Amino acid sequence: MPENWPPNALLVLGASEEHIPLYQEAARRGIATIAVDMKVDAPAFPFADAAMNVSTRDADAITDALAGTRPAGIVVGATDAALPTWRTLGLHYGMPYVYPEAALAGLDKAAFHEVVADCGVAGYGWAASNDPGEVTAKAAGLRFPLMIKPVDGSGSKGITRVTGPDGLPAAIARAHAYSASGTVIAEEFIHGRQLTIDLFLRDGESVMTCIKDQTLVPGRSVVRRISTALLSPAQHRRLEEVAEQLCGALGIVNGPANFDLVLGEDGHGRIVEANPRLSGDSIPRLHEAAYGVNVVGALIALALGEPFDAYLTPTRNAHAGVELLGSPLDVNGELTGWEGVAEARNVPGVTGIELYAKPGDPVHPHDQSGHKIGMVTAAGPSPAAVTAALDKATSLLRPIIRPTQETS
């Protein structure tokens, strides 16, 4: 690691592909960046001015590595793991923006259920424990089907949908393996329209709100497509008010947050979970395509203590969507190449294509967010136009994958 870090740099906690836009935006503004990630081959490292190969969970190791260098600001993108460190380092260095302590409740699904209940927002049945036997017994008394999850997980890792008590032991063991705290939560599955709502707040009110429909990979709990939702103004405002209320309870006064929710037949939006940070899955690209806003630029400005309103002023009002590309195989494989890239880029309405996997890279079944291998963004005057553009582009864009694991 460098002995002399760039001065007045932005310290970015995370260097996954989701963080690449942060480094690109900082470079566009002439701001030096120091990337922190424990993976030596983290995909965003080449976009940073300097790289620190340290875990984003280890605040002490980061301060030790920085030695006497004080960053100009600290920022985190689409990762939960680094959020406690963001707060710790913000306090340590007296940063212009310090991540709120109350927001850390959003990282614990059980704690967040309590926040939702305290706010008087409609909820549903759940049970959590670090004792597999206890959570099994409690889950058996809930209404099936159930979603079994690690209480502190993200990115759809370790999630299983269970239709009856016989499936609980295996699902709980799987979730337990993905939980840093060893705690598993069972939640009643809510039938309805799968939505996600993103906000960027200033002084407790949202200055950028985007509500989107989510489509899952068939048979799995990972998102495949996200597109702006067509809602009545009353529905939109009602869901926005609920999200603003929850942000207030989480102490998020300025900055981004997003929530997964289900809009039931009764018209109530039931919050499934919170992500008290910038969205992943290329959602910032979607916001830009739909509204012309730059939430990444706003987040960097917030971290540096600068005004950020200008980044969130809409310049257009369109619909947009993102298709997350994954392996079509149910076994591990190796990418040998891509076909149809140029043709897909030329589809009317397509605004961007990013390929995260290159020939020779290992690829895994698309059963969690981290296993995506690319994305396509499209915009248009209606949801139907966006759907047509994404369908056409993804029919042309094909990953060629050689299986490296025999099917059973």
Image (cartoon, rainbow, N blue to C red):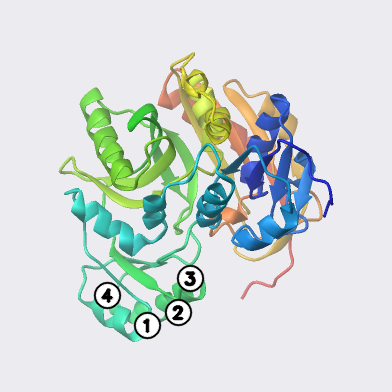
* Position in image of residue 358 (x %, y %): 77, 48
Label 4 packing within 10 angstroms: few (<14), some (14-19), many (20+):
many
- Disc 4 or disc 1, which is closer to the eye? 1
Answer with mark 3 or mark 4, whichever residue precedes in sequence: 4
Query: Dot 1 lies on which element?
Result: helix
What amino acid does circle 1 point to? Pro
Q: Is residue 32 left or right of residue 386?
A: right
Answer with mark 1 or mark 2, whichever residue precedes in sequence: 1
Q: Which residue is mark 3?
A: 179
Q: Is residue 241 left or right of residue 29?
A: left
Answer with mark 4 or mark 1, whichever residue precedes in sequence: 1
Determine the CA span between mark 3 and mark 4. 18 Å
What amino acid does circle 3 point to? Ser
Q: Which residue is mark 1?
A: 132
> Which of the labelled discs sits on residue 328, or is there none?
none
In the foreground, 288 or 113: 113
- Disc 3 or disc 2, which is closer to the eye? 3
* Position in image of residue 238 (x %, y %): 22, 33
Answer with mark 2 or mark 4, whichever residue precedes in sequence: 4
Determine the CA span between mark 2 and mark 4. 14 Å
Q: Are marks 1 and 2 in contact (CB under 8 Å)?
A: yes
* Position in image of residue 249 (x %, y %): 29, 46
Q: Is residue 21 left or right of residue 273?
A: right
Q: Which residue is mark 2?
A: 173
What amino acid does circle 2 point to? Ala
Task: For residue 190, say whether it is visible.
Answer: no
Determine the CA span between mark 1 and mark 2. 7 Å
Q: Which residue is mark 4?
A: 139
Query: Dot 2 lies on which element?
Result: helix
The residue lying at 31 percent from left, 70 percent from top is 163
